[in-house]
Image (cartoon, grey):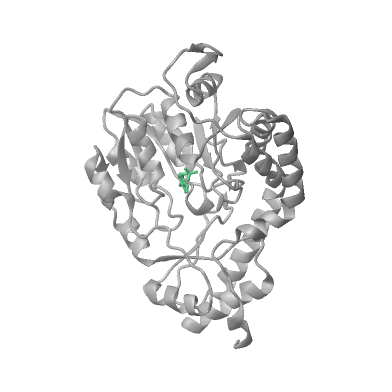
Amino acid sequence: MTTQTTLNVPLVDLRASYLPVKEQILTEFENIFDKMHLFLGENIRNFEQEFTNYCKAHAGLACSNGTDALTLALKAFDFPCGFEAIVPSHTFFATVESVHHAGGTPVMIDIDPDTYCMDPNRIEDAISEKTKVIVPVHIYGQCADMDAIKTIAQKHNLHVIEDAAQAHGSFYKGQTAGSLADAAAFSFYFTKNLGAFGETGFCTAATDDVFNRMQLLRHHGHSGKFDHDIIGYNFRPDELQAAILRAKLPHLDDNNRKRRDIAAQYDAAFANLDIKTPIVAEHNIPNYHCYVIQTPNRDDLVAHLGKHNIGTGIHYKNPVHVQPAVQTIAHRAMPMPVTESVCANCVTLPCYPELTSDQVTHVIDAVRSFF
Ligand SMILES: Cc1ncc(COP(=O)(O)O)c(C=O)c1O
């Protein structure tokens, strides 16, 4: 074990994810710079088709980032000002922020203690006459219980929008994330399982009407070069990032398989420790965007792993409903015992396809030596 302490295991390794696609990306960059068609060109169009097909969604379009994708998806339904959206509090801040940007009021609910996704049993208590939409988050790359959520949505005449920002290539009952609801939003932030080397996002839509509105909203409401039909945004994606995403997409499934394999090794190695390892619902195949464990000694474990040159993350340290910014906007928060406990105990370990077996062993040994 002493020789292994020299190994470095960062939480993410962007360079390692670049090397397999480097030549393809650089060739494509040259083509783009030769033509100087920098946005909404052939790379975007092709990527939109390819990722829509990948998700088996009805339609899809790229945009500036995942936060804007969520805002676009929410705005596409033209909900009345002050509408309420039911969201989990255990998520990245953008889920709640985008509801506010879209003119809505976030209503935050607790999560399931096993999957860490929105707990469907908490939804009905949060519904009011202003509720229009439920936004489940496929947190850490494991899908929320969409059938239970959609049953409640149908009963109360609500829409469902997936926050699939972390769920590229995750499956729920054999269906791909992004094809499970009325619309979905993805992030291609560079740490994601499918990441650009900059910013890009993506929306899918289950109907042409929603898709057409997303398309108008994305680009200043342009219906023709000199015509603006609705007030929109500048949420344009760019060609360079689309070329990167096109190069990486064919590797996504294989990379997700490698993540699942590393997760299985961690699960087995930590089985008899005072650790809660990830629990996967029977119907789910997660993409392990984050491999998150819970332990009451989280901060000591983080320090111990740091001494062994192992990077860790905390997703998330403070739930959204306690963030100072949220206290300044209209919102509601339901009781959050599970969310608060998970935030106090969770730690994310390195889990990405480029990890070598020596690095995986180093993480396992270091975690085991702590306990
Ligand atoms: C759950 C979730 N929603 C939304 C977003 C926002 O995506 P972006 O950073 O691309 O704006 C993220 C990104 O981290 C996320 O993890």
Total residue callouts: 0
- Compared with residue 196, is residue 358 higher up or lower down, i.e. above or below? below
Q: What x and y, as percent, mark residue 216?
A: 51, 20
Q: Is residue 38 left or right of residue 333?
A: right
Residue nearest the observer in this picture, 207 or 307: 307
**Residue 214 visible in the picture:** yes
Q: Is residue 86 left or right of residue 34?
A: left
Residue nearest the observer in this picture, 347 or 329: 329
Q: Quadrant of the N terminus?
A: bottom right
Q: What x and y, as percent, mark residue 205?
A: 54, 28
Residue depicted at 37% across the width and 61% down the height:
342
Q: Is residue 223 left or right of residue 22?
A: left
Where is residue 250, by image quadrant?
top right
- Compared with residue 98, is residue 268 higher up or lower down, i.e. above or below? below
Residue depicted at 43% across the width and 76% down the height:
303
- Compared with residue 164, is residue 281 higher up or lower down, i.e. above or below? below
**Residue 334 visible in the picture:** no
Where is residue 230, by image quadrant?
top left
Q: Is residue 370 left or right of residue 122?
A: right
Q: What x and y, as percent, mark residue 231?
A: 41, 19
Where is residue 129, by image quadrant?
top left
Q: What x and y, as percent, mark residue 369?
A: 51, 84
